Amino acid sequence: MANPADDARLMGAALALSDRGVGNTGLNPPVGCIIIAGGRVVGRGHTRPGGRPHAEAVALAQAGDAARGATVYATLEPCAHASPRGGACADALVAAGIARVVIAAGDPDPRTDGAGAARLRAAGIAVTEGVRTAEAEAVMAGFFSRLRRNRPHITLKLAVTLDGSVALASGVSKWITGERARAHGHLERARHDMIVVGRGTQDADSPTLNVRLSGLEGRAPIVAVMSATDGVSGGARWIASPSALAAVADANLVLAEGGAGLATSLIAADLVDRLLLYRAPILIGGRPALSAIGLPDLAPAHCRWRAGPIIDLAPDRLETYTRIR
């Protein structure tokens, strides 16, 4: 008989694999998968760069004949549709003789959306769904945002002081935070498909917006600049407005960096899903992170953000917040 505690624990291993692919799987979800036989892991995999092969295919290839009669833990419902880049994972699991499949989250893609689990059950495979669903959807937030809201998941990153400033009154902002916080910011870049800054930031700082972490240099995201008028430089993509950013079709995860103008426009448009505040222990009385965002009074400001982990990046700290929707 299945043990719920064991299912939750083993799904945790699949979630850790899923996390490895964040920002590196194109428009496909970063799925994690492990295969258990005889109490040991015989196969493991996560979605490969660009979205193929899928996690289940990688894990099955590793498991080989040991997959027969085994249990699969997948962070997303195995797909039920084939494509020119690969067959349906549900069919591959059936062919491999898998006995049981444990699924964290259902696939909202209409080509699967329940059909994957149904195909497994029709083949006599025991299926358990809903194991650590919220965590799986958080790891695959960009994919779920694209399918459910038809727009990318947007993270706003701000480096601020204790008094909420993002720059001196003169506009100088290098550097508010220290090396550890800046390195973490580069890690976030590597975990996103696109990075966008405001025109003011581009003109003032000419940022390179690449990933300067050893081993992750190839994970640099698409670079875009938001500006009411075209004329952006350096090969960056022009994004005319927050609504144009929401309509971007080739990115699941967008990281917004820059100054108060970009931050204010995205917050006012209610497009920020995740907020990263890299807070430095300094007071400068400078330019605030936000200007007016159109609130008529304080009531609508409450109950909109859920506080997440605080990460020590001494001398700074990272505060994380998720938009409650």
Image: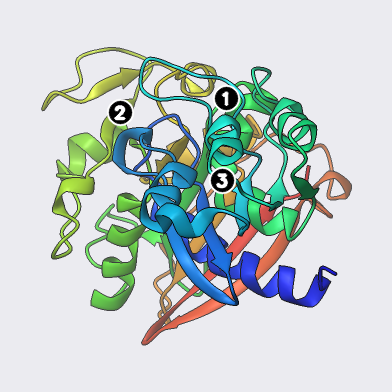
Question: Residues under labels 3 and 1: Cα distance?
Answer: 14 Å
- Whether residues under marks 2 and 1 lie with C-beta atoms below 8 angstroms apart, the answer is no
Mark found first going from the N terminus, 3 or 1:
3
Residue receiving disc 2: 225
Counting the numbered discs, the total is: 3
Residue receiving disc 3: 140
Q: Give left or right: position of 195 versus 40.
A: left
Give percent across and percent down for residue 1: 85, 69
Mark found first going from the N terminus, 3 or 2:
3
Give the structural element (helix, strand or loop) at label 2: strand
Using the rendered view, name the quadrant where residue 187 is placed. bottom left
Q: Residue at x 37, y 46 (%)?
A: 257
Q: Residue at x 62, y 33 (%)?
A: 145
Q: Give left or right: position of 132 versus 50.
A: right
Q: Seen from this angle, which residue lies furthest bottom?
A: 314
Residue receiving disc 1: 151
Q: Give left or right: position of 145 versus 314.
A: right
Q: Identity of the amino acid at label 3?
A: Met
Mark found first going from the N terminus, 2 or 1:
1
Mark 1 Cα within 10 Å, few/some/many (few <14, many 20+)?
many
